[in-house]
Image (cartoon, rainbow, N blue to C red):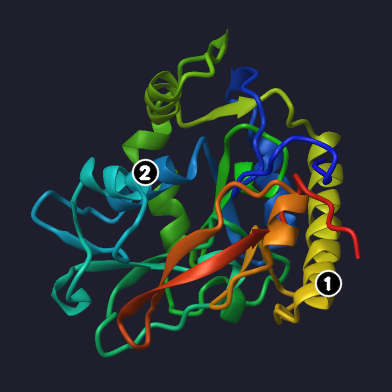
């Protein structure tokens, strides 16, 4: 846990790589199946790997354009490029669309332009409701969450499926059938990690067990709620939706330099996309994830 007395804090929680185990993920799906019931969930090693697997599951190909917001991260663009072709302008010309819910904020896309949303990308949010309106506000078949951005694990993601048909498509996609049946020490080197997790979509961090997952998830929810309340009191930034917990709060107005320096915040700005207006804007961030405890 980072306080003003310790090291700097990044945009998302950081956890060192650990040993990984293949095929021991059933308890993760069981936990989130109960949490998000009646919707079913699937575990995949990483959010970007989940995006590739979903595109594979729906039958996307190189000739298919997939809309993502301008300035999307390399990991999202590369995940799409494994199967299809990313597009950052003219969503109406794309066959599929991914809607990114920036830092807990629910994005509602213009339905005249976004006619085939397949992924509700909530990788840097924790949604504490099983409501379809919260999980799939644009009618997407899949909601993707990053465990690494929720709790203190180095990797892992869950995909919540809106329908049984969507669940079966993803569950049976060839990418999820890869099974190496091995254990090894995962080298904490980005190029190696990207390759390893893409080719081993079922590996699970040894930090996650049937005992630790509920405790870690509960602690994350409590910490973020505390931090959101604290930053709202300190700055007046309104993040009051209890069902959508962000990894960062953002504001069009900069947070104070004193506050940034107190918690040694590294990443202070990001571009977010307005799905109704079709434009990007630069906003100022402040982390509220499980790596920090903000004092009121």
Numbered mark located on residue 220 in the image: none
Q: Is residue 76 left or right of residue 249?
A: left
Looking at the image, is 100 positioned above or below residue 215? Answer: below
Q: CA distance from mark 2 to mark 1?
A: 31 Å
Q: Position of residue 37 (x, y in %)?
A: 69, 64
Q: Mark 2 vs mark 1: which is more N-terminal?
A: 2
Residue plotted at (52% across, 14% down): 187
Looking at the image, is 102 positioned above or below residue 107? Answer: above
Looking at the image, is 119 positioned above or below residue 291? Answer: below
Residue under pointer 1: 229
Residue plotted at (51% across, 74% down): 136
Quarter location, residue 38:
bottom right
Q: Position of residue 63 (x, y in %)?
A: 8, 55
Is residue 158 visible in the rendered image? The answer is: yes
Q: Position of residue 16 (x, y in %)?
A: 65, 24
Badge 2 vs badge 1, beta-carbon distance below 8 Å: no
Q: Is residue 292 left or right of residue 70?
A: right
* Front in this rendered view, residue 296 or 129: 296
Residue plotted at (61% across, 19% down): 21
* Front in this rendered view, residue 111 or 266: 266
Quarter of the picture containing the N terminus is top right
Crowd rating for badge 2 (residues with CA inside 10 Å; few <14, some 14–19, many 20+): some
Is residue 142 visible in the rendered image? The answer is: no
Q: Position of residue 53 (x, y in %)?
A: 36, 44
Quarter location, residue 279:
bottom left
Q: Residue furthest front?
A: 258
Numbered mark located on residue 75 in the image: 2
């Amino acid at each position: 846990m980072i306080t003003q007395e310790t090291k700097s804090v990044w945009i998302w929680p950081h956890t060192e790589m650990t040993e990984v185990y293949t095929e021991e993920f059933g308890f993760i799906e069981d936990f989130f199946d109960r949490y998000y019931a009646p919707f079913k969930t699937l575990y995949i090693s990483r959010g970007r790997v989940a995006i590739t697997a979903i595109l594979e599951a729906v039958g996307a190909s190189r000739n298919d354009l997939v809309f993502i917001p301008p300035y999307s991260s390399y990991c999202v663009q590369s995940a799409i490029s494994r199967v299809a072709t990313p597009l950052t302008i003219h969503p109406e010309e794309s066959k599929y669309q991914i809607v990114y819910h920036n830092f807990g904020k629910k994005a509602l896309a213009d339905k005249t332009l976004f006619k085939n949303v397949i992924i509700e990308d909530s990788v840097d949010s924790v949604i504490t409701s099983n409501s379809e309106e919260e999980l799939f506000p644009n009618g997407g078949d899949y909601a993707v969450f990053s465990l690494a951005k929720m709790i203190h694990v180095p990797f892992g993601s869950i995909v919540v499926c809106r329908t049984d048909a969507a669940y079966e498509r993803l569950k049976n996609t060839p990418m999820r059938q890869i099974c190496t049946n091995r254990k090894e020490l995962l080298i904490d080197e980005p190029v190696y990690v990207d390759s390893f997790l893409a080719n081993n979509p079922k590996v699970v961090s040894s930090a996650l067990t049937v005992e630790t997952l509920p405790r870690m998830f509960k602690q994350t929810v409590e910490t973020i709620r505390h931090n959101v309340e604290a930053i709202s009191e300190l700055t007046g930034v309104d993040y009051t939706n209890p069902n959508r917990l962000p990894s960062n709060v953002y504001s069009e107005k900069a947070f104070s330099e004193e506050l940034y320096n107190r918690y040694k915040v590294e990443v202070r700005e990001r571009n977010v996309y307005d799905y109704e207006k079709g434009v990007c804007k630069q906003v100022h961030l402040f982390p509220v994830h499980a790596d920090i405890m903000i004092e009121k």
